[in-house]
Amino acid sequence: MPPTWEMTEEEIRARRVPVDEQRVLDVRHMTRQFGGLLAVSNVSFVVEKGEIFGLIGPNGAGKTTLFNLITGLIQPTSGQLYFRGEEYTGQRPHYIAQKGIARTFQNIRLFGSLSALENVKIARHTHTFGGIFGLIAGVLNLPPAPEDERKTTARAMELLEMVGLAERAHVQARNFAYGDQRRLEIARALALEPRLLLLDEPAAGMNAQEKQGLSDFIRMLRDKFSITILLIEHHVPLVMGLCDRIAVLDFGQLIALGDPRRVQHDPAVIEAYLGDEG
Amino acid sequence: MNSFLLISMILAAMLALSLYLPLMAGQLSLASPGFYALGGYIAAVMSTKYFVVTGPFPVLYLLAEMAAAGAACGVLALVVGIPALRLRGIYLALATIAFVEILRVLSLNLEITGGAVGIFGIPQPFSDRGSYLWIAIPLLLLSMGFIYRLERIRTGRAFAAIREDELAAAAMGISPTFNKVLAFMLGAILAGVVGALSAHVLNTWNARQGTFDSSINYLAYVLIGGSRTFVGPVVGGMALTALPELLRALADVGGLPVWLAEFLRNGRLIIFGVLIALGTVFFPQGMVTPELLARLFGRRLRRAEQVASTQPVDHGAQRR
Amino acid sequence: MNTTLILQQFLNGLAIGSVYAIFALGYTLVFSILRVINFAHGAIFTLGAYFTYMLLGARFGFNGVFANLALPFSLPFPLALLVGALLSGLVGVVVERLAFRPLRTRGADPLLTLVSSLGVAVALVNLIQYLVGAEIYTYPPRVLGSLPAAVNFGTSTLPVPVRTVQIIIFAVSMVIVVLLTYLINGTKIGKALQAVSEDATTASLLGIDTDRLILFTFFLSGFLGGVAGTLVGLSVSINGPYFGISYGLKGLAVIVLGGLGDIPGAVLAGFLIGLVESFVPAQYVAYKDAVAFALLFAMLLFRPQGLLGRAVVQKV
Amino acid sequence: MSVYESPMVPATETTTPLLQIRDLSVNYGGIQALQEISLVINAGEVVTLIGANGAGKSTTLRTISRLLHPRHGEIIYDNRDITKLRPDEVVRLGIAQSAEGRRMLTRLSVMDNLLLGAYTRTNRAEIQADIEQQFGRFPRLKERSKQLAGTLSGGEQQMLAIARALMSRPRLLLLDEPSLGLAPLIVREIFAIIRELHASGVTILLVEQNAQLALQNADRGYVMEAGRITINGLAADLINDDRVRKAYLGDVPPPVKLPPRAAPEEKNGLFGLR
C-alpha cells in the first residue's frame, strides 16, 4: 500500500483531470481480493488512444480478473477506473458496454443456439430505439422499428462479411469451428461500435498460420474502426510483434510496463514469466 | 367437443404462454398461478361489488376488468420481480412458488376474497358458456401474435441473449435486470388477464385457483409442448388439458372389456401421469420444435430466404 | 404466556419440526447428488405409509381395487417399518430407472426431470387412489406395544405431555442425520457420491460406476421416505393419497432454507420452521402456513446458500 | 533442442499393440467428429495425437474412455474389445485419462482427489504407498494435501490431474492437452514429468495442440485433420516433415533466448521412479 499522502495526491489529481480523450482507459490502484487471495493488487496503467496494448503474465497472474474488473463483471475491492477522463468505477457491465467498452471472452461466450447473424444483431442493442416504447413500436412494426431493423441487419451483415462469415450468417453459432467462433465473437464486439476493445486470448486454439493472420487482422481493426485495443495473450511472439506497449502481471501485481523490446529484456519479466533455471 | 373443454384448453394455452414469456429471457418463473389467482379475484370483486348491474353483464365491463387485472398484476410483478429476479434457475422457481403460496394463504384469510369459501355468483355476460370463445379465441391469437412479433425484434433478441448467457448479454450493453423484469411482467400481465376471464367463465373463484400444483402443470404444458418456440406451450397446454377428458371419453367406447373401461374412467390420471413422464423421455425437445415448424412451413421460409439474398431483411424466423 | 405453555409450544414445535426434517432428508439427498428436485418423493413417502399399514396386517377400506383386503399375516411394527421402507426404496429405484436415467443419459435439460418426476408423482398418487381409495387410514392401535402414549415433560400438576410417537420421530431423524453425515463424509462411497455430485463425467473417468451410485442414492432416498411416511402416518394417520404431497411443498421450503443439498442444514431448517410455526400468535394462526414461505422467500433473497452454507464465488 | 533422447519403439508387425483402434467413426454434436480413424499404441510407447482445435483429438480420447459411443469401428485393448464397456470398466482394465481442462473435484481436498483416483483398488497399504509416491513426484501436492482442489493454481491442478489418473495404476495413460492454459515454465515442468513416466514404463497417448512440444517428447505421432488421421510416423520424422511444419508448427521463432534447460535425469531424487 502506498503511504496516505500519496493517495491524497492521487485524489486531488482525480478531481482535476479534465475530459481527456487521449487517455482512453485509466486504471488506478485497481485491487481485487478473493477471500485471502489478492488476485489483482494495486495495478495502475493508462491505455492511450489508438494503442494496441498487451497484457501478459503467467497463468493465475490476474489478467482475466483485471479484464472482468474493467468491464464491470466483478467489482474492485479498491481503486478507480476512468474511461476517456470519466470515472466509471462500480458501474454495471451493460452500462460500461453502452459507454463504449466491448470485449471478447477467454472461453468464447457466444449465444450458441442463435445464428451468427443474430449474435451480431444482439450487440446492436444500444444503437436501436428501445425501452417500453421501442417494444410497442417493434411489436406493431411502427416507425422507427422497421427502419431500425433493416439497418441493424445490414450493419450486422457488413461485420460478418468483414470476418468472412457472411455466407454462414444463418448457421447456429455453436456449429462453427473454434477459430470461426473467435472471429464471430470479435464481429459481435465490434457491432457495439466500441472505442475500446478488450480481447481475451484471441489466439487461443489457433494454429500458427491463423495466428499470423490474426496479427494483421487486429491491426486492421484498429485502423479501420479507429479503436483502441487491449489484449491478453499467452502466445508471446504474437504479443511482441503486435503490441505498442505491454504490461506484465505476476501474482496480481504489475511488474513491468513499456514497449515490447524493453519488456522482453526486463529481468523481472524473464524470471516471472519464463522462469529462471540458471 | 363441448365448449367448456375448448375454453379450458384455450385458457391453458395462454397460461402456458405466461410461463413461456419469462422463459424467453431464461427465467424459470412459476409465479403465473399467483397472478392468475389475483386477476381472477380482481374480476370477481369488481363484478360482484362495483359493477353491479341488472340483466346481462356488459362485455365492456368484463374487458375493463381484464385490463385492470393485467395492470395490477404488472405492477405487482414489478415489485416482486426486481428483488426476486436476482435469483437464478431453480432458486428463482422456488422463490416464485413461495410467492404463489403466500398469495394463496392470504386469499384464504382475507375478508375481501371471501376467505375459504371464495366469491361466487360472478355475473355472466353471455347466456351460454360457448360465447366466451368470442373473447378467448381473439385473446389467444393476440397473445400469440404479440410473442411472434416479440421474437423478431430488439427486445426479443435481448431476451434470447440473456437466456443464452446473461453475462455475455450484459457485456453487449443489454441490461439484464430491465429485460428480465420486463419479461416477468409480460407473463404476469397475461396470467392476470386470463385469470379475470377465467373467473367469469367458472362463475366462482376461491383459493383453490392458482396453487402450487398448477405451477407445475403449466411447466409441464411448456416443456411437453416444446419450450423453444411459442407454438409449443400453446399445443402443450391444449393437449394436456384435453388428454384426461379424451381418456374419459375412451372409456365410453363400446366393446371394451369391463376392467379396461373401469380403469380408463377411474384411473385415467394414472395414465396421464405416465404419459407426462414418457413425454419428457421420448420428446425431450417437446412436441413442437422450430425444426418441425420449419419442415411444416418450409416452403414459406425458403421464400423468405430468397428475399434475404437480394436485400437485407430480418431473419428472426430461423431463430433457435 | 407462562413457562409451561412456552415449554409445551417449544416441544410441539420440535415435534412438528422433526416431521418436516425427516421428510426433507430423502428429498435433499437426491438433490445433493443430482442437483434436481424429485417431486415424486412426496408420493414415495405416502406409499411408505401405506406399505407399512398393509404389512401390519390391517384391512383396507371400502373403495378401490383392494377394498376390504388384508394380508393373511401381520408383522410386528419395527419389522413392518423396515420392510415397508425397503419396498419404498425399491420404488425409488424404479422411479430412477424410468423417469430419471433415460433423461440423464440423453443429457436432457434438468427442468425436464422436474416435469418427469411430476408425472411419476401424479401417476403414483392416482394409482394409490385407484387401489385403496381416498379414505383416511389410521394405524391399528397399540402397534407400539406397551409403550405409553405420551411422556410428561412437566410436573404432575403442570403437565407438558409429548406423544411418544413424536419422540420416536425426533430420535429417528437424529439418528438418520448422524448416519447420513457419516456415510457422505466418512466413507469411500460418500466421497464417490460427492464426486458424482460435482462432476459425473470426471467421476466415471476415475472408475466410479455413476449409474449404480445414483441408483443407490434413490434407494436410500426412497428408504428414508418410507420411514418418514410410516412415522408421520403413525403420528397423524394417513389422510388419503395426497398425504405426502401436502408435506412436499413444506419440504421444499425446508430444504431450501437448509441450503439445497445440505443434510444437517435441512434438519436444522425443519426444526426452525416447526418452532416458528408453533410460536405464531393465536390471532394470526390462520397465516401459519405462510410463515414457512415468507421465510423461504426472504432466505432466497438474502442468503440463498442456506442456513449453514458458505457463499459460492461465481467464476466468470 | 531436447536434451532428452527418447527410446525408439517403432510400430512393427511383431510387437503386440496395447491399444489398437480400427476404423473408428464417431458422431458428436451433429457432425461426424471422427471418420474411420485407425491407430496403434505399443506397450511402453509415448504416442502423440496432434492437430488443430476441433480436429477430433479429444473426441478420440473420450471415445477410448467410453464417454462417447462410436458409430462404427472397434477399440481393442490388450486383445480385448472394449467398444461396449462402461467408462468405469475401462478404468478397471487399466486405462486412465487426465481429461482436458483438468476437471478437478474442486470441493474435495487434494488427498480425497487422489484417493478417488484409486477408487477401483482395494488394498489400502498399496494405495497409501502410491500416494506417497505421487507426493514424491509432485512435492507441491504434498504441501497442499488438505487444501480443496479448487484452490490450487492451474499448474498444480494439472499435476493433481495426472497424479490422480496414475492412482489407478494404469497401463495406458491418456493425457488431454496437459499444457493448456499454463505458463511456459509450468509446461516445462509438466513435460519433465511426462518424460519421467515414460522412462518408468507407462504407456502414454498424449493429445496436444502444441505440436512442437508434443513431438519432442513422443516416440511416434499421428496428425489429425477434420476428424481423419492424415499423417503418421516417428516423432522425429514428423518434426521435420514439411507438411507438418507448415500446418502446425509454423516458423515462429521462440520468444526470447531461453536459458539452457536442465536435464530432468539430474533431478532423480525429486521424481521417485517406480
Image: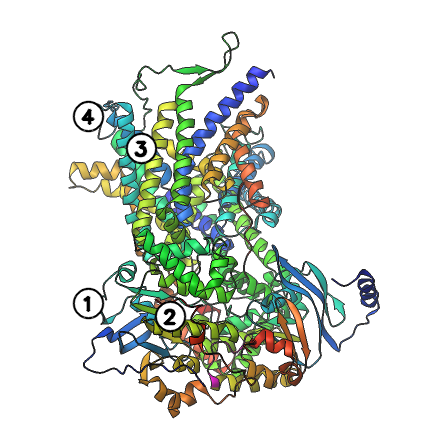
Residue picked out by circle 2: D175
Q: Amino acid at mark 4?
A: Leu
Read off the chain for label 4: C
Residue at x-position 52% and y-position 85%: D254
What span is colored magenta in the figure?
A201-208
Mark 1 lies on a secondary structure that is strand
Read off the chain for label 3: C
Co-location on one chain, circles 1 and 2: yes
Whether the residues at callouts 3 and 4 have beta carbons within 8 Å, the answer is no
Q: Main secondary structure of the magenta part?
A: loop
Co-location on one chain, circles 3 and 4: yes
Whether the residues at callouts 2 and 3 have beta carbons within 8 Å, the answer is no
Q: Residues within 10 Å of mark 1 (few under 14, many from 20)?
A: few
Quadrant of the image for the C terminus of chain A?
bottom right
Residue picked out by circle 3: C48
The residue most toward the bottom is: D242
Residue A203 colored in magenta in the image: yes
- How far separated are the C-alphas under marks 3 and 1? 46 Å
Whether the residues at callouts 3 and 1 have beta carbons within 8 Å, the answer is no
Residue picked out by circle 1: D80
